[in-house]
Amino acid sequence: MIDSSLKEIAAALRAKKVSAVELATESLARIDAGNGRINAFVTVDREGALAAARAADARLAAGTAAPLTGIPMAHKDVFCTEGVLTTCGSKMLANFVSPYDAHVVSLLKQAGAVMVGKTNMDEFAMGSSNENSHFGPTRNPWNTDKVPGGSSGGSAAAVAARMVPIATGTDTGGSIRQPAALCGITGIKPTYGVVSRYGMIAYASSLDQGGAFGYSAEDCALLLSGMAGHDPRDSTSLERETEDYSRDLNRPLAGLRIGLPTEFFAAGMSDDVRAAVDAAIAEYRRLGATTVEVSLPNARLAIPAYYVIAPAEASSNLSRFDGVRYGHRAAEYTDLNDMYCKSRAQGFGGEVQRRILVGTYVLSHGYYDAYYIKAQKLRRLIAQDFAAAFEQCDVIAGPVSPTVAFGIGEKSDDPVQMYLSDIYTIAVNLAGLPGLAHPAGFGAGGLPVGLQLIGNYFGEARLLNVAHQFQQATDWHTRRPAN
């Protein structure tokens, strides 16, 4: 049953062909069977899941169920969950039990979704491969010698391995779209501010955004509808009416204008990824869409701008982890300053320390104007490029990642090559736009290839419609890993 779409699962629940407890039990059994091999979950909340499932069955019996009631799901371990470990993939928070729920967690609890556990992730969401976790790397279900992508690799792998049908993730520079592509599932990052960041442990506050993973665009639409909405506790949360993101799924694509940025199709994309992306775009043309060439001339500056802005914000956000109130504290120290130094040196992994150092440097006296302010100016130029492109098209399409999933350890010693994994996704976060990745074929080694769709502000429903129509005409999203 877990293999089915959310609509099919919900229909089976309402028809009493299956109970929420049975679904939760099936999900937990799949985690027990596969997590030792894939390492998608950091925490499994067996008792909490079964209790939530029993409550969901009561709602179903009373006729008060919502669309997500009784659906098993997982949260990326960056979302605070009351009474359950929230580690952020770090030794610093390895024993932290949150006293409250993130806004996203609260909304999905109210909707009756059944959280079975918390998924593995790059430490503090810093990474593109899910190799930076204190709890060890997550492995790609299609080939366990390969990475699942990051930083939301645990959530993507859990969905791809059919441990859960849906999961939450966060996207700061591509961390939903890239693992969705590498694991052969669908993932969406909404417009910045659509999903509350309250209770979502911050990496880079002006870039972080929660989003959804599912087997299909339709499943993502249902999950996003349940987790989006204004939250007065988050100053960046947008005051907008809640939306039904599934409302336009069946809209035909006739007349749709798809922009193809020349910069996305230049050198750098592997031949197998290019072939799958070209075939997907040809399919969109068969579905009635037209394509137009657009330009994003400043997209090449997205990575250097991002790796100034994001570390700068991270150095500020992570200053709170000092061993005083919560988190890891060094066992031995001589004075307060020594406690700070040792606690942070022991609690943070190498990639986190690298980004804190970079961020502190670019914010320091004499470098703030030269680096941070200049990066913010580049960010504005990138946003203006997208605005100009959307005058010529309705959505933008291109690759998600320059290659299929690479080997575990293959890029660990070369941070620059690792950062280039996000070359097609980072500009979307800098501009605050919505982006979606959906399965588009397979490349070298039988590994999945994803297609990226980028929309204008608040264009989530249109992106989901476009992807859904593609998925009605193709079966890439129904393919399953062999193991």
Image (tube, grey):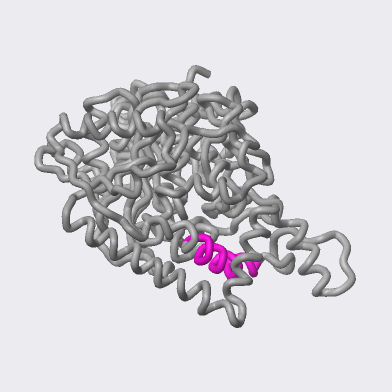
State the extent of the magenta-drawn residues as a range: 306-320
Residue 319, magenta (yes or no): yes
Can you give x and y, in whole percent of width and height, for residue 474 in the image?
26, 25
Residue 217 in sight: yes
Residue 332, magenta (yes or no): no
Q: Quadrant of residue 186?
A: top left
Can you give x and y, in whole percent of width and height, for residue 97 in the image?
64, 53
User: Quick check: 394 above or below 184?
Assistant: below
Q: Nearer the viewer, residue 143 or 20?
A: 143
Q: Indicate left or right for 78 with 59 as reference.
A: right
Predominant SS along the magenta part: helix
Q: Residue at x 37, y 56 (%)?
A: 299
Q: Nearer the viewer, residue 144 or 89?
A: 144
- Which quadrant is home to the N terminus? top left
Q: Residue at x 71, y 51 (%)?
A: 91
Specify the farthest residue to the bottom: 365
Residue 52 in sight: no
Specify the farthest residue to the top: 482
Q: Quadrant of residue 428?
A: bottom left
Q: Indicate left or right for 456 with 338 as reference.
A: left
Q: Residue at x 50, y 48 (%)?
A: 420
Can you give x and y, in whole percent of width and height, for residue 210 in the image?
43, 53
Can you give x and y, in whole percent of width and height, for residue 290 in the image?
15, 40
Q: Nearer the viewer, residue 333 or 108?
A: 333
User: Quick check: 344 above or below 179?
Assistant: below
Q: Residue at x 26, y 45 (%)?
A: 260
